[in-house]
Image: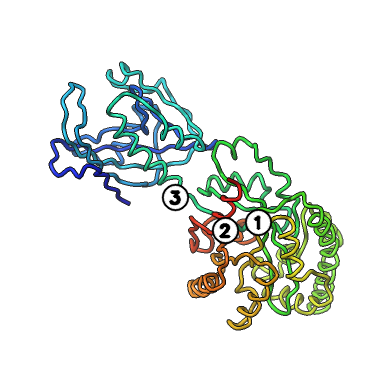
Amino acid sequence: MKKVINIDNISVVDEEKEKVRLLLENNQGQILLCNYNGIYMLPGGKVDSNELLEDALKREIKEELGIDLKKYDNLVTIDHYQKDYPKLDGSLLNRKVKTHYYAVKAEVSLDRKNQNLTDREKNNKFQLEWINKKDILRFIKYYKTNNPRDRFFKDELLYVLELYQNNKLIDMHTHTVYSDGELTPQELITYAFKRNINVLAITDHDTLNGIKTIDKNDPLIINSGIKIINGIELSAKANKGRMHILGYDIDIDNKQLNEKMKELRTNSYYSVLSLINQIKKDYNIMFDAEDIKDIFSSIGNIGRPHIARLLMKYKYAKDVDEAFDKYLIKAYEKTRFSNKGISYQECIKLIKDAGGFAILAHPNQLKMNDKELEDTLQNMINCGLDGIEIYHSGHSKEEIKKYLLLAERYNLLISGGSDYHGINIKPNIELGTGFNNNLKIKKLSLVDCIDKRIH
C-alpha cells in the first residue's frame, strides 16, 4: 500500500530522503513511540545509499532499541511532500521523504545497554515511551508543541496509526469451552488480540456462563482497546437444516433470558441421550459410561459436538466433520422432533427483551431454496429480527452476494464472523479469517449500531 501526502501541491523538490520506521505493539496493547526533542515519531530512521530496506530497519531498531528485529510485516509506504521544512541551520526547503512503515506485534524487552544513539539523539534527549493504543490517537492528535517540524511528523504519524487501527479485524461469531469451543473466554480474548482482532463477540450456544466470566477491566482489554461484545447463539426448532439466532449487546443479567438458559441446559441432557441411543440402535456403537458421565459434567452446554469427540476417541471418525457426516446428521434427523426446543419467535423475543440485536446465523445451514428463505426471513422480520449473518466461514461468494441483496431489500443489519471453535474441533476455521482466509471483516453495520448505542 502506498500513500502520498502533498497538501501544498509541491512540484519542485529541493531534497529527497528515504526512511524506515517500525510500529511495535506489545502484548498489553501499547505502542512504542520515540520522543525526540519534543517530537513524537515511531522508531527508525534513514536508509543509507545502496542499503536494503530490511537491513536499514534492523540496523535502526538495533541502534535505537538495542534489540534484534526478526519478524515484521509491511504496513504502508508514504511519500510525504513537506513545504518549507526547517533544517537545523534555520534554512527552509521543500523536500520529499519516502518512509517505509513496518508493523510487528510482539512482547519485547528494550535493551538500553545495547543502544547506539547518535550524539544528536543524545543531546536532544531521545526517549522511548510505551503508550496505550486506546489513548495514543487522542494523545498524538491533541499533542501541542512550538516546534515547526512537529506539523509534518504529526500528519504522518496520525495517518499511520489510524491505518493500523483500521486494519484490525472484526469477528462476531466465536465459541468457548462453555459451549463447544476449545478455549476459555480469557484465552479466546488473548488469542483474538494476537490475531489482530479489534472487535470480538463471544456467542456460545444457549449459555451466558462464558461471557459472564469476562472482566472488562482486564488490563489487556483496557490497554489494547479490544471491544468485547456480549453475545449468544440460540438454537431454534426447524423442520430441516439448522436454525440459529445470534443475540448481540444483550443484558447478560436479564432474568427471563437466564431462566430460559437453565431450562435449555436441562433439555440438552435429554437431546444428547436420545442421540447416543439412536447411534447405538443404528450403528451398534456404545460408549463407556464414564465418557458419557464426563459429557454431562461439562461446564458448558452439551450437544452434538461432544458426541462427535467421543466418536473420534473411539476411532469411528477421524474428525468432527466426518462424525457429523457419517453418524450425527442422520441420528439428529430421527430424533429432532422428539427433542424439546424453542421457536425462532421465542428466540428473537428473548434477545429483544434482553435489549439485544437479533441476527439470523449462517442462513445457508437452513437448507432452504431462495423462496423458502425469503418467506422465512419476512416472517422473522415481523417478529423483530434485526439482521442477517452475511459473512461466515461456510458461505460461498455467491451466497454472500445473495444475502447482501436480501439485507438491502429488507433494510437488515449486516453481521459476520468465523464461527471459531478451536483448532481441534474445526481445524480449517481460523479466528478472524475463517476458512482458507475467506474472511477479512473490517466494518459491519451491526457493529456501527452497537457503537452508537454505547456512545
Name which residue lies at 38% across and 39% down.
158
Q: Is residue 177 left or right of residue 417?
A: right
How crowded pointer 1 is (Cα within 10 Å; few <14, some 14-19, many 20+) is rated as: many
Query: Which SS class for mark 3?
Result: loop
Callout 3 amino acid: Asn
**CB atoms of marks 3 and 1 within 8 Å:** no
272, 211: nearer the viewer: 211
**CB atoms of marks 1 and 2 within 8 Å:** yes
Q: Which mark is residue 248?
A: 1
Name which residue lies at 73% across and 70% down.
344
Q: CA–CA distance between discs 1 and 2?
A: 9 Å
Callout 1 amino acid: Tyr
Name which residue lies at 24% across and 36% down.
47
236, 293: nearer the viewer: 236
- Compare marks 3 and 1 and give the one earlier in the sequence: 3
Query: Which SS class for mark 1?
Result: strand
Q: CA–CA distance between discs 3 and 1?
A: 23 Å
